Image (spheres, grey):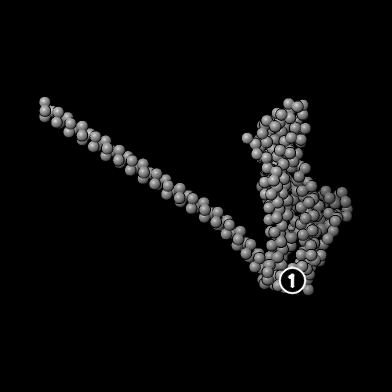
Amino acid sequence: MLDQAIHQTTMQGMSVTRDQAETRESLQRSLQGVSSRHRGEKIIQGILAACAILSIATTIGIIFILVEQAVEFFVEVNPIDFLFGTKWTALFKNGEFGVIPLVAGTMFISVLAMVIAIPLGLMAAIYLSEYASFRARSILKPALELLAGIPTIVYGYFALTFLTPNVLQKISDQTAPYNVLAGAIAVGVMVLPMVASLSEDAIRAVPKSLREAAYGVGATKLEASTRVVLPAALSGIVSAIILAISRAVGETMIVALATGSRAQLTSDPRQPMQAMTGYIVQVFSGDVVSGSTVYLSLFAVGLLLFVITLLMNIVSHIVVRRFREEYQ
């Protein structure tokens, strides 16, 4: 009996020892797994940080190149004459570099484009978010956003070969072959999906309770949409509009093809005007000596365009923070 008890006690001790060993091994494997996952997270974090740093470094590099070359340009051309001059004849002998005609052309095209894109985009956004059925929305919204995928050079040729000869010149025989209006219409159609899609997302983010409250006091769907939902989504809508304006200001191929290359000050949209991006395309497509004043003027114009779009983006962020509505 004594031997049997000793044997049983020994076996129990060995079993406990094996269980403890297995527990230690399991704990070590778990710790190794946690450590491996931790290293994996560190690697992913490093890759993401590198991507963020690369994007920032790219932006800094672009700014550095623009500023460096623009400074060389302003050594030869007075900045005051550049910013406030009203005559741009950069490609002529003894040319003048007053950038106002290029800025005026860019802004004229952008304003006319927004006159088209803002009302159409907002009406499309209201319809998609407030009136359209699920089936209609699932068809119309992808079709609308398809416009954003069309290459801008196609819009340019459409404006040049169809809008001008078949529409605008039929309406007014004073319309020039290259004109502001055709380019503005094409740019407006191009940025319309941006206004519509971003505005529709902002409108759909408004809580349903606000709509129900408006219906509860007797408002129609149109009244609820225009007097309750739109003001509640104002920050998102204004941000969408400013981003669309920035996109229109920076558009290149449409204005290069459709609006002409005459840098002039005019209020007649039937006449040609040259935008800043159009001038850049014109010079780069020609034979310009590297380091010449005309070559350096590209960077001065590019820097001014960069500053304009940067200011618009800053205004967009300020508007979003100022008018943002947070709902629980």
Vertical placement of residue 248 versus 63, above or below: above
Residue at 68% x, 59% y: name it: 306
Q: Position of residue 53 (x, y in %)?
A: 55, 56
Please state which of residues 80 and 323 is positioned toward the viewer in this rendering: 323
Q: Position of residue 309 (x, y in %)?
A: 70, 55
Q: Amino acid at mark 1?
A: Val
Residue 18 occupies quadrant: top left
Residue at 68% x, 52% y: name it: 314
- Residue matched to label 1: 77
**In the shown orientation, is residue 62 left or right of residue 4?**
right
Q: Secondary structure at mark 1?
A: loop
Query: Visible in this render: residue 77?
Result: yes
Query: Visible in this render: residue 140?
Result: no
Residue at 67% x, 46% y: name it: 321
Residue 32 occupies quadrant: top left
Q: Position of residue 238 (x, y in %)?
A: 72, 45
Q: Position of residue 78 (x, y in %)?
A: 75, 70
